[in-house]
Amino acid sequence: MANITLREIAHSYSGPSDNPDDFALKRLDLTWKNGNCYALLGPSGCGKTTLLNIISGLLVPTLGDVLFDDRVVTKLSTEQRNIAQIFQFPVIYDTMTVFQNLAFPLRNRGRTRKEIEPRVIELAKMLGLENDLYSKAQHLTADAKQKISLGRGLIRQSVNAILFDEPLTVIDPHLKWALRSQLKRLHKQFGFTMIYVTHDQTEALTFADEVVVMYEGAIVQVGTPEDLFERPEHTFVGYFIGSPGMNIVPCRVEGNILRLQEYDLPLDRSYGDLSRFSKIELGIRPEYLSLAPPAAEGVRVDIVKLDDIGSHKIARVRLDDHIFNVIVPELTEMTADQATLVLDPQHINIYGDDIRIGGER
Amino acid sequence: MELELQNISKMVGKEMHIADVSLKLESATLNILLGPTLSGKTSLMRLMAGLDKPTSGRLLVDGEDVTGLPVQKRNVAMVYQQFINYPNLSVYENIASPLKIGGASKKEIAAKVDEIAGLLKLGDMLGRQPLELSGGQQQRTALARALAKGADLVLLDEPLANLDYKLREELREELPRIFSATGAIFVYATTEPSEALLLGGNTAALHQGRIYQFGKTIEVFHRPDNLITAQTFSDPPLNTLPVTKLNNRMLFKSHVEIPVMGDLPALPDADYTITFRPHHLYLQPNSEKAIGVKAKVVVTEITGSESYIHIDVAGLRWVVLAHSIHTFDVEETIEVFLNPDTFYVFDSSDKLVVTPAHMAAV
């Protein structure tokens, strides 16, 4: 077990280069603390798999070093780093039983039967595989197979970290819930460092203590699920997290007054001179907007659409050219074609050229 | 056009893959087949397309029997999970390919490709090769080709499953508009309840080769007429509580007691399954009807604005979806609250006998 540090890492698949555009992974420094649970979240092509491969040792970075505690491991193999990996598709031996599959990583390292058996049985219980221990893997369902894969990752107590690359993508929604909560429990029991790569925000946020959000080869924010939701540091994080994502709309800010089209709204903090930015935007989550009757004082909007998506509804409203998504309760009925948009000042974020500005209370 | 399946069954060896499916689909509609892996979605689509022959039952197009007519003789297009395009052809040529085969003139082709590319927002990409596109754009190209074919029946088999979450969100938003702009029958397979809800249209809940309910998507969601449909159409999973009704009480072991009131008294004494959705299980009592139940926390998942609290209630596994962030320790005992107004109650043959009060009013 160790802290994993990435020191001035960068990677270009075409080798060393002076052109920053060649880098799939831009320069970054980051420490993964021993025993924590991380998610690496971002769209396809953002560099998250590149980063994972650098940590696991499948890839040597063009620049920088990987450290396990104080030891440089940049050029060591996955095996030498003592890292377990779990992939999108189950990697198991179909003709072996569940027991043999789980025991394999231990047997491979010359452990005795006496050491292996209790460990396998304990883990099988935790994973809910105890009734299938002596069945051949090929006869099991997709989620049971993926559980075996997880089990093979978890079986060795000495690993430095367990890396997951989209492990639930092929699993049905109902089973995802069960597997995810099981994984989270296992983390609490074993305390391994876990790094979980996904493009699915729900998986990332529910799994991790800390989420690393990547965009175009760079880390745009590292934070708790709450940080990412409440205070996205970059408009991309606001857009990418949440469903629908954050409403981002051009505005002007003077001191503690937000000017949105012809409306002046109070802010809960004050912003200094913002003239250095070429673009100022307001960011507010659909969860923090509400609609009042059109006669009420406030921002008058046109209702474009109201979608019932089951447990709640999404209202799409328009202020001139700008669309806002508003989450409204499940029993809301709306007959008018206009409404008053209410913004919760505590949850307004202001962005200058896509970066969040702190402001002063 | 109208496509009708009459008592269609499909056996493979001794295994029943599709069991007595009857369904009527109208043109210009979007029809979702919702069900888990192996529930029969792909099998049913293959039967609709004429790629497979049913073991029994009939397939009618506008009242005419087409059972056994092979796919080549039917006007059908299919889009798969793995996007398939011609890698050496440009996006334009990809979209144009079914039109060329159909013998359209150059001018006709250009007009049609323009129209469809506009619909799918591919106008700026026409000169590119598929591999230079993002996953979402590649899948839009595959979809555009299916539309260019002018098929009466377009079958989409989990078309968004391989795409990034946000791309899926965007495409899901565009698809209903695209579908309504053509006149075809669309059939769309998915495992995800949330996807069905975002797309709208009609939904068929599929389980073990059988259709349990078919109707407008939002109505099937709000008014499932049987337990299997309610379970198929719930993500996070539906909370279920098996009870025995005795006089004026419904009991689950010695652990939960529901006083019978409202619509419940009319029910005869028997076994029932009470179900309610995760956002209708509360951490605080929210009405005088609230019923408190002791539970053990299994694990808490936080999404930033909400918490999913997985709990164990005397061996039952439930999920609470609560606003804002709650942190509970594993194994901690907490009290959760049920509200009978939100109950769907099913009888021992899984038929709906009580609709939630607030749904009955809508």
Image (spheres, rainbow, N blue to C red):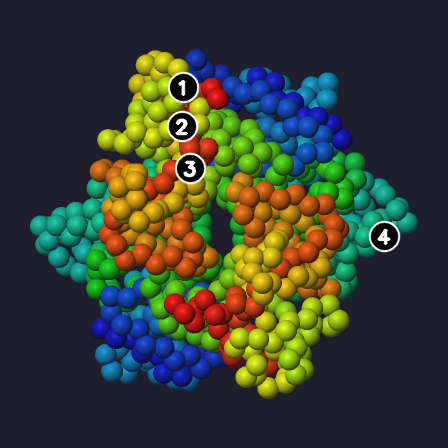
Which quadrant holds residue A137?
Answer: bottom right
Q: Mark 4 lies on which chain?
A: A
Residue A267 has which mark?
Answer: 2
Asked if residue B78 lies left or right of residue B343, the reply is left
Q: Mark 3 lies on which chain?
A: A
Measuring from the top left, give residue B362's x and y in whole percent: 39, 67
Tell me what residue is drawn at x 53 percent, y 71 percent.
B344
Q: Mark 1 lies on which chain?
A: A
Numbered disc in front, either 4 or 3: 3
Measuring from the top left, give residue A6's x and y in whole percent: 61, 22
Alpha-carbon neighbours of circle 4 within 10 Å: few (<14), some, or many (≥20)?
few
Asked if residue A333 lies left or right of residue A164, the reply is left
Lower position in the chain sequence, tag 3 or tag 1 = 1
Query: What is the quadrant of the N terminus of chain B in the image?
Result: bottom left
Residue B13 has which mark?
Answer: none
Residue placed under numbered mark 4 in the picture: A117
Residue placed under numbered mark 1 in the picture: A271
Q: How far apart are marks 4 and 3 (CA)?
A: 57 Å
Under circle 2, the secondary element is strand
Q: Are marks 3 and 1 in contact (CB under 8 Å)?
A: no
